[in-house]
Each structure stands twice: as C-alpha cells, then as structure tokens.
Amino acid sequence: MNRLEYREKVDVCVIGAGHAGCEAALACARLGLETVIFTVSVDSIALMPCNPNVGGSSKGHLVRELDALGGEMGKNIDRTFIQSKMLNRSKGPAVHSLRAQADKAEYSRAMRKVLENQDHLTIKQAEVCELLWEEENGKKVTGVKTFTGILYDCKAVVLCTGTYLGARCLCGESITYTGPNGLQAATHLTDSLKKMGIELRRFKTGTPARMDKRSIDFSKMEEQLGDERITPFSFSTDPESVQKEQVSCWLTYTNEKTHEIIRANLDRSPIYAGIIEGTGPRYCPSIEDKVVKFSEKDRHQVFIEPEGLHTGEMYISGMSSSLPEDVQLAMYRTVPGLEHCKIVRNAYAIEYDCINAGQLQATLEFKSVKGLFSAGQFNGSSGYEEAACQGLVAGVNAAMSILGKAPLLIDRSEGYTGVLIDDLVTKENREPYRMMTSRAEYRLLLRQDNADLRLGKKGYEAGLVSLEEYQALEEKRKLIEAEIYRLKNTYVGANREVQKFLESHESSLLKTAASLAELLCRPELSYEILEEIDKDRKELPPCVLEQVEIEIKYEGYIVRQKRQVEQFKKMEKKRIPKEIDYDEVSSLRLEARQKLKQFQPASIGQASRISGVSPADISVLLVYLEKFTQ
C-alpha cells in the first residue's frame, strides 16, 4: 500500500514548549501568524524542572522587561505564586529584584491554558526530527518533519529545545537517556542541525533532590517569610489582587560532616570521574563543586522551598548534585532538619546539546540560515527568565521577518534583555550563561521598576502591547514628569515651621529657601515625609511616586549614566557593511581579523565587545570604514 504524504501549512513552527517556546509561540500567534508549537509531552508545557521560582537577583529585571514588551511570564507567576519577596531592599533601587516561589504544577497548568486559548496557535505533541531547507542564494528554512513522518511547511522556525536535545541524566554510575524529570529526550534533531552546518556543543546543568515534607524537621531551621506587602511582577496586575496568604521557605546549612561525605565519594561523582562531557554553570555549582572549590568554607546555605500547595515535595536549593543515591541520602541527612529526610526524587545532572550563540544575529536568527531562529537554553544560557526573554525576541523577529517589518532590537543601554542577547552573540561563552546585575554597565538606568517606561514603546511598536495599555503608560510618564517639575519649582523658606520639620527628622536646617526636590535629595527625607510641608500635593498612584523619588534622589548619577549611554549609542550607530572583507584591513591583528570574520559584528560597538578585538583594532577599523564608505 502506498504511503500518503501528509503536509500541513503554517507560518511559524516553534520547537519546544518550555519558557522560551511559550513566549515565542504566543508572540507569533498574537501577531496574527498561524503558529504550531511542538512538545515531546503536552504535560511538560512551561515545566519548571529545576527551581520552583521566578525572578531573583537580575532575573527579576528580565521578567519585568518581558512583561513590558508584551510577554506572559510575569502575568503567569502573578496568578500562581505562593510566596513573594523583593530582594536587596537594603541596597539601592538598581539592584532591587523581585522573586516569587511558584506552585510548579499550577504555573505549568495556567500557561498551558493561555496557549490553548490563544487564537492562531496550535499545540502539537510530536518530536521534530528534521529541519527542511533549500539552498538558493544561501540556506533558507522551509519546514520541519516529525518523527512520525508528518511534514509542516512554514516560513520560519524557532528552536527552543531547552535541555532535551540529546539529553542524558546522570546520578552517580546510573545514566538514563531522558530529558529533565524523566521525560522523553529529543534524539533525532541533532543530526539534521549538523547537516545544516550548525555548530553544536555539550553543556550540563543539575538539580537537587526533592524531599518528603513529612520527613523534615523545620524546628531546626530558620523560617523565611514573604513580604508583608506583595509587589506583582506584571505592570498590568492590580496590586490588590495579589495580597494573599503565603507559604514559608526555610534556611539551614551544610556542615563539615556533610563535606567529609562528599570528599570521600568524589570518585563516584560523574563530574569528577570524567563521565560528564558537558560544561556546567560556574555561578550555580553543584554541592560537590562548592566543597572542592570553596574548601575554606565550613558551611553552605541550603534553602528548603515548597514545590506547590498541593504537593508535599520540598526543593533542596543549594545542594544540586550528581552523586549516587546512597551518597546523596547520607550527605543530606547530615544537614540540620534533614536527619530523617526521605528523598522523593534524586538529584541529578543533565547533559544536552546546544549551540555556540555566536552563530546568531542580534535578532536571534542564524547568520547562515534565513528564517531559522533560536532561543533559550539551546543558545547556551541558563534559567527560565533568560529563556523566556530570548523566546519573545526570537518569536517577534520570526514574525517580523515574515511580515516584512523592522526587527525588534534591544541594545545594552535599553535593557537587561539587550545585555543578555549581546553577551550571547558577541562573547565566546564556554559555560551556561547566567544573567547578573554586574553584567549591565548602565544598571542605574535599567532598573526593574522602570521597565515599562523603558520598553513599553517597543512592545507597542512590535504589536504585543495594546493601544490602551500604551496610552496608560504615556499618561503615567506625563504624571511623573509633571510631579518632578513641580517639586523642582516649589520652594519653601527657612521659616519656623520648615525648620521645626527638618529638626524633627534630624535633617540640617535651611539657611535660605530650597526646593522640595532639593530636600528630597537628602537621604533622611522621603516623598512621604515631605507631605508635612508640601501644601499643594495631589494624590498620585504609588507607581508614579516611586519613579519621582528615584529620579530626584539619584538624578546626578542618572545624568552621568545617560551621558555614557550617548557615547555608547554613537558606537552602535557606526554600522559595519555586510560586504566588508576583513582580510583587506591590513593593519588589523590576526586574532582580531579571525574574530571579526567569525562573529560578523553589525556595528563598531558590537565589534568592540568581541573578545580578542582590542581598542587599537577598533581604531584601525574606524579609519578603514571612513575610506570604505566614501
């Protein structure tokens, strides 16, 4: 009997339904393109295979930016969190970061519901085993083929394979060829990618054990509570709607006995026995790595975090491991409160195929294959938040390439998302990339509290933020500017009432009249406190007042950083023509020439951030470009 060839026609195929895939697929569908999202298991949509939280230091910035651009992660965690906390409150606003514990099952279920109800979006449980492309003036993707033989013709593909591609999980001597949480690995797509000429590499990550809550003695641990007043992630979430009862997390510590057990069994760890080929994340090490690399420390923090409201599983944050099960049980039971613990799921390491992201443009489209985009851990990054931001950018740009519109580009001065993508595509990342506040040069401008003001217009222009939302944002901006102007132009004299007010707040007395803005710059005074002498004040939303206070208190630093951004923008605007032949730039050093040919930077600014390209090389390139463009 002859086999029938069955073909579907869609606009975009998204491969993988993790955090990157969900954002990519939603972006494409919301822009009106017929989109299909493939997953090895429908039950794994927006799965949290590792830590049960969203946000955290610098990652909270990413979620806020994603929300400002029209993404879904912030809204979804607001629906499903069980504890929320603003980190780094004792420091300046640039490093304040929101972090929420998620109900993992509810988070996945809620995101799946969003996808199922999204127009133009189809969910398909199938493994994509092959990419289809044609070679006519370079490679161009034309579709995908599933393991069962069904063909999908499309105009763009977004790869969001996460940690599933060629995955294997390691727990001591035990190796299973599965994806995270024992789910089916994707084993067939790697060969197709290699045939296309895409460079692949092996990375690894790990996860700690999950414990039975009933076997834990919380009386020996320090309780970690959420904030009294909860701040939502999404700018569209009503703050009153998220004020609810929260669950507790708990803090305990490893000790020398824990470390002795680990050291005595290092030869049974796949990491130290040479079984693991992939490179792991430096900033999220296993407990074995911590004990070896930080041998001077006599203890390490261990956070006990609930996985949800309807499960007794507790996540043992800070103790990821690939040691054998018997060693895991012995070491965990040395930790105060875990003496009688029972493991529900063993800790394990996972290896997977990913790419060298230097093959991508800033749009996250492959330089060598038109219509092929990539996002998330497949790009060599780590973390749900990093993945989600890349997913939205890749999805929007896949859509824009089909619609013939300008791409969505975010540079380093505009957002952490821009820093993330720029670092991925211009640096040789030899390990899973993790976002940190220290990576952002302009972090005083790139605060989480002003993400909507920074990126809302880009979200609107891309088509993911509605006109109504954008108008509300512009109204907020006007209120902020008007109130700052009023405070700068409202003066109080050195009269008895004002001096008494200043004295009561241990603030130095006035010698001459001063503006309310000048008084607000004093660290001991706040906008709220100034209400006592501010007679013309109107009631304004809390989100407006927050921006007013930050902009005035940090004005000197902000102005200085804006000047730095202006210099940065000048370098970014100096574009490098695609047809440039670096071999003709005779004064370039050999290493610089090789790196420039490899990364093909789009601008002088991007070229200057490539490892191996010196300031002297940039000067040579600038001189050459002046002659080249004449």
Image (cartoon, rainbow, N blue to C red):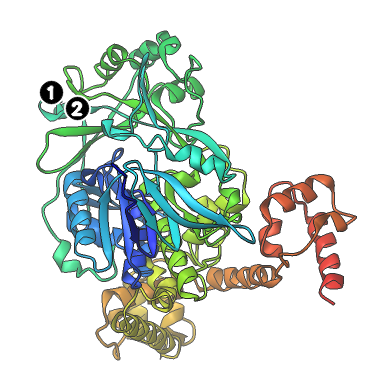
Element marked by disc 2: strand
- Kindly indicate whether the residue at mark 2 contacts the one at mark 1 (C-beta within 8 angstroms): yes
Disc 1 marks which amino acid?
Answer: Ser
Does residue 381 appear in the picture of this structure?
A: no
Q: Residue furthest front?
A: 1
Residue in front for this viewpoint, 216 or 414 = 414
> Looking at the image, is 532 positioned above or below residue 570?
below
Q: Residues within 10 Å of mark 2 (few under 14, many from 20)?
A: many
> Looking at the image, is 119 positioned above or below residue 515?
above
Q: Is residue 474 left or right of residue 292?
A: left
Q: Position of residue 46 (x, y in %)?
A: 27, 49
Element marked by disc 1: helix
> Could you tell me which residue is drawn at 34 percent across and 27 percent down?
319
Where does label 2 land, which residue? 211
Where does label 1 land, which residue? 215
Q: Position of residue 26 (x, y in %)?
A: 31, 63
Residue in front for this viewpoint, 52 or 18 = 18
Disc 2 marks which amino acid?
Answer: Met
Q: Is residue 328 left or right of residue 457?
A: left
Residue in front for this viewpoint, 140 or 269 = 140
Toward which corner of the image does residue 68 lie, by quadrant? bottom left
Q: CA distance from mark 1 to mark 2?
A: 8 Å
